[in-house]
Image: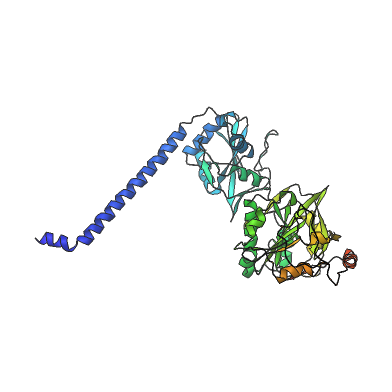
Amino acid sequence: MGLIRFLYRNKSVILLSFLIYILFWLATQIVKQSTDFHQAQEVNQCKHRSKSTFYFIINYLFQSKFNLILIDPHVLRHLFIHHLSFDQLEKQLITFAIHDESVERLIESLQDVKFSIKTSTDHIFIEYENKTVHLAILHKYNSYYLVHKNTLLLSNDIHLSYGDKVRAVEHMESELHEYLFYYPRNVSHFLWLYKTSEFLYCNRELADKMENEFHLYQNRSRFNLTFMPTIYVASVLDKLEKHYWLAGGALLGWYRHCGLIPFTDDADFGLYAEEYDESIRNYFLGNPVIPLWSALGLANDSLEFRLFTGHWTLDLFWAYRDGDHRWFGFQIYRTKYRRTLPLLEELCSCDLFGHRFTIPCSPTDYLDGEYGRDKWKTPLEKNYTWTNMKYHSMWNDISWMYVVRLYTPNGKLRTDKFAIEWVSNHFNYSFTSIPSFLNALPDKPVTLPPLNTNLINSISARQNSSRKIPQLTIQRGLQQQNGTRS
């Protein structure tokens, strides 16, 4: 009776204990089945035997618990773009990546095998039967890995895809191939990034001079307000596969300060005009991190997007190809200027506070063209000019109705008094509403509204503007918010 009474009084505790036991048993069975499944997968993958010498080396490393990541652009295209067999590869050397924490154990494991091993700074070459597996060592940074240049002398017929130069590799998700190596989950995006992977360093000597001689230090207290939105925009453009580069003061800050110019409150990005589509506008309309504040110009002429957080302005300038050069548009109300740029057929990578950004591959030539030869090496907080900027023309009356689009923080087109007056204050016609077209002229003929009583003398404005290049100051970002560019 005592036992029955005990069980009755504690029935809740007993039932709870029994339930916990059942749940524990089910969890262990699920884990066991999952482990058995993955082991079966590996066994099945190991059944994909190949006569390839490469496979023999790869299989040995996999069985020794080394994870190789295929980063060889040629082989990635062969397997995943052209969908050809691994056994059909006709290469003497294949490049894989390996994380730096695995290197010491790898070297030890290769001491007593029949492979021929050669090593250099951050590169390992495993040779067997006239085939070579090249392991490029990855060094981890905040948002990317770095692969250093190979220093080992190789035969003239071997051309490394990694190790030829210092290169950056983005962090990536990977999947296991049936031949026991990992590969980027998004191969096409990895190959797109490879084109800009050559890595350049900032000028550390010049940056030290900025601090020691000019007492210009990085303002870490404003880091989240200024730099984090810049990182975000760069990552979005990479995601959308739109080539960009740090331009103007952003490029100057990276090279001269190895950071940001301490007294700046904006950043400039350049983009190829031929890659423009509406995906960028759509992404930043109402964006919670840094929304699109205004779009200026036409899609085929002087297009510029201004993104604004409330504290930090980031300008996206589209660069238009014109013969052997490119140009940015720059406008002050209806006056159009053009900044001449190099053709920029190739872009490279750099580090800014541990994050990868894209830059011109000849940054000093770019800065010389923007600010004058070596003049950018002396910091000026205000009254600096772009030496590559010249007056071009004025927006005509029809174009002027379509070149200014302002947006609310939630991504709606502004049609309020402020937006209308931005256009009407420099317009000869009675302008009362914002057309719906997005920085493009409509296909059908446009009828101008009635003339104003007091006309604006645009010819005089053009004559004055053609002879005077505006000075650029640190207040530009705040002036942009109010609609000025002086």
Instruction: Mark yes or no: residue 353 visible.
Output: no
Residue 187 x %, y %: 59, 42
Q: Residue at x 68, y 48 (%)?
A: 196
Which residue is more in the foreground, 38 or 436?
Answer: 436
Residue 472 x %, y %: 79, 67
Q: Residue at x 25, y 57 (%)?
A: 17
Looking at the image, is 446 positioned above or below residue 156? below
Residue 45 x %, y %: 46, 35
Looking at the image, is 116 positioned above or below residue 244? above
Q: Residue at x 52, y 29 (%)?
A: 50
In this rendering, the count of numbered labels is: 0
Check the image and name the residue furthest to the left: 1
State the image quarter where residue 97 is shown: top right
Residue 366 x %, y %: 78, 55
Looking at the image, is 71 positioned above or below residue 298? above
On the picture, is 169 further left or further right than 42? right
On the picture, is 191 further left or further right than 380? left
Q: Quadrant of the C terminus?
A: bottom right
On the picture, is 249 further left or further right than 168? right
Looking at the image, is 84 positioned above or below residue 38? above
| Colouring rule applied to residues | rainbow
Q: Quadrant of the N terminus?
A: bottom left
Check the image and name the residue furthest to the top: 51
Which residue is more in the foreground, 451 or 469?
Answer: 451
Which residue is more in the foreground, 419 or 350?
Answer: 419
Instruction: Mark yes or no: residue 138 visible.
Output: yes
Q: Residue at x 10, y 62 (%)?
A: 2
